[in-house]
Image: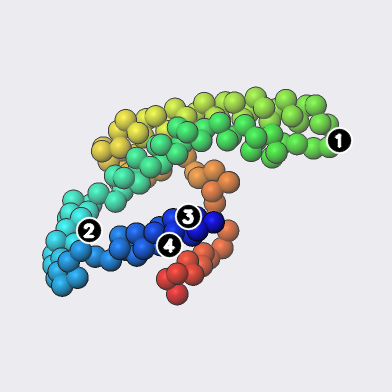
Amino acid sequence: MTHVRAVGVGLILMGCLMACPLEAGAPPAPASETDRTDELFLRYQLDPVFEKLGRGIGNTLGGWLELPLNIQKRYTPADAATSIATGTVLGIVKGVIRTGVGVYEMVTFWLPYPERYAPILPTLDYFQRAGPQREPLLLE
């Protein structure tokens, strides 16, 4: 039991020592160095480029989500078999299209096509924002 207590105290002391900065009197980095990335993004207008790349990755990896979404949209209890079959076929077709558009956007993310990096497909219903979003609690 004493050994376990000694190990626990040792771990706590190591954690405290690692949390302390080695150079307590070191001045913070100048603002011009810390904001360099933001400055470059604004100068070269890279935000839409990386949004297009992110959309492409999301559409490529999430194209299969069209299948359950379309089955859910088309389902009616009165005609379950036909509505499930219709939703499945439509989901497969839309999923292939979404995956293809995602690959296109990933490959051409640096080109401003379509006009000013506009999205080709609408966002999936899973990811639509429903109303105003609250700020995270840590920022309030």
Q: Secondary structure at mark 3?
A: helix
In the image, which disc is placed on residue 114? none
Q: Position of residue 45 (x, y in %)?
A: 23, 52
* Residue type pointed to by label 2: Asp
Give the crowd class for mark 1: few <14, some 14-19, many >=20 residues within 10 Å. Answer: few
Closer to the chain start, of discs 2 and 1, is 2
Mark 2 vs mark 1, foreground winner is 2
Closer to the chain start, of discs 3 and 4, is 3
Mark 3 vs mark 4, foreground winner is 3
Q: Is residue 49 in view? A: yes
For image coordinates 78% across by 26% down, the residue present is: 82
* Residue type pointed to by label 4: Val
Looking at this view, is 73 or 62 the one in front?
62
Could you tell me how far apart the alpha carbons at marks 3 and 2 are, in whole angstroms? 51 Å
For image coordinates 81% across by 31% down, the residue present is: 80
* Residue type pointed to by label 3: His
Could you tell me how far apart the alpha carbons at marks 2 and 1 are, in whole angstroms? 56 Å
In the image, which disc is placed on residue 38? 2
- 22 displayed left or right of 7: left
Could you tell me how far apart the alpha carbons at marks 1 and 3 are, in whole angstroms? 69 Å
Which residue position is annotated with label 3? 3
Quadrant placement of the N terminus: bottom right
Q: Secondary structure at mark 1?
A: helix
In the image, which disc is placed on residue 78? 1
Q: Are marks 1 and 3 in contact (CB under 8 Å)?
A: no
Which residue position is annotated with label 4? 9
